[in-house]
Image (tube, rainbow, N blue to C red):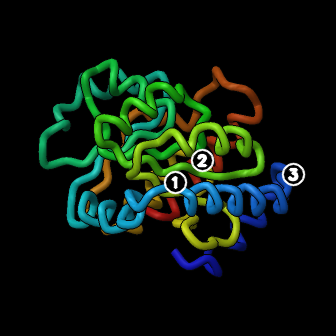
Amino acid sequence: MQYCDWEPTYKEILADFGFDRAKDEEAARIAAEILSRSDNKNEHVEQELERLIKGKAVIICGNAPCLVGDINKHDLFTASRVVIAADGATSVLLHEDIIPHIVVTDLDGNVADILYANQLGAVIVVHAHGDNIELLRTVLPTLRGNVICTTQSKPIHKVYNFGGFTDGDRCVFLAKEFGAMEIVLLGFDFEDTEVSARKKKKLKWAKRLICDVL
């Protein structure tokens, strides 16, 4: 994803939600600064993501209530498939004894479970935006390598933009960026009526973005 291709969509999202672009850019700078102080365990995460994803069948797990049912009715979790968890789906997967290979998160989910998945070897893709700056400062330094950061705004050193807005659709953009052969979605409910009006709007955006990229 080239930023020039993503930026028009980003501007639409900013206008629709009233987000502060300057705060997104500040979050990206802070994430870059934190990563620059970390050890060299993070230097080759892009290559690790490509090794995990390129040419593989990828299962992307959203955090809708249907996730457990989807897991139980699909015999998909084999050694040859790569599992990407969208934020809070990490907790559900761990409870089901499934360790995700990759976690895509803006740190809204259970941070303890995300840290545990990292300890078990998961690559953590942390999204920096204007509303999670303090979490970035708290959580990023505690992750044990295999960490990469993303932004919705213009990418800067060590902070990437593969496209996407919500955790779920960012998983899809990530899988496409690194050459997934097949993408299967579990635990996605774009029509969920049991969520807030703001969440419903985010789900509409997620559906639009995923339809555009798949």
Numbered circle sitting on residue 139: none
Three-letter amino acid code of the residue under disc 1:
Arg
Q: Which residue is mark 2?
A: 166
Q: Amino acid at mark 3?
A: Gly
How crowded pointer 3 is (Cα within 10 Å; few <14, some 14-19, many 20+) is rated as few
At 21% from the left and 66% from the top, the residue drawn is 55
**Amino acid, disc 2:** Thr
Question: On the image, numbered disc 3 is attached to which residue?
Answer: 18
Graded by Cα atoms within 10 Å as few (under 14), some (14 to 19) or many (20 or more), the crowding at tag 2 reads many
**What's the residue at 44%, 26% (across, down)?**
113
Q: Is residue 146 visible?
A: yes
Quarter the C terminus occupies: bottom left
Q: Disc 2 or 3, which lies upstream in sequence?
A: 3
Q: Is residue 210 visible from the viewing direction of this image? A: no
Residue 129 horizontal/vertical position (percent): 70, 51
Q: Residue at x 78, y 59 (%)?
A: 26
Q: Which one is nearer the viewer's eye here, 180 or 157? A: 157
Across and down, in percent, residue 96 comes to 28, 20
Element under disc 2: loop
User: Dot 1: what SS?
Assistant: helix
Query: Do labels 2 and 3 touch, CB within 8 Å?
Result: no
Q: In the rendered view, tell whether residue 77 sits above or below residue 5.
A: above
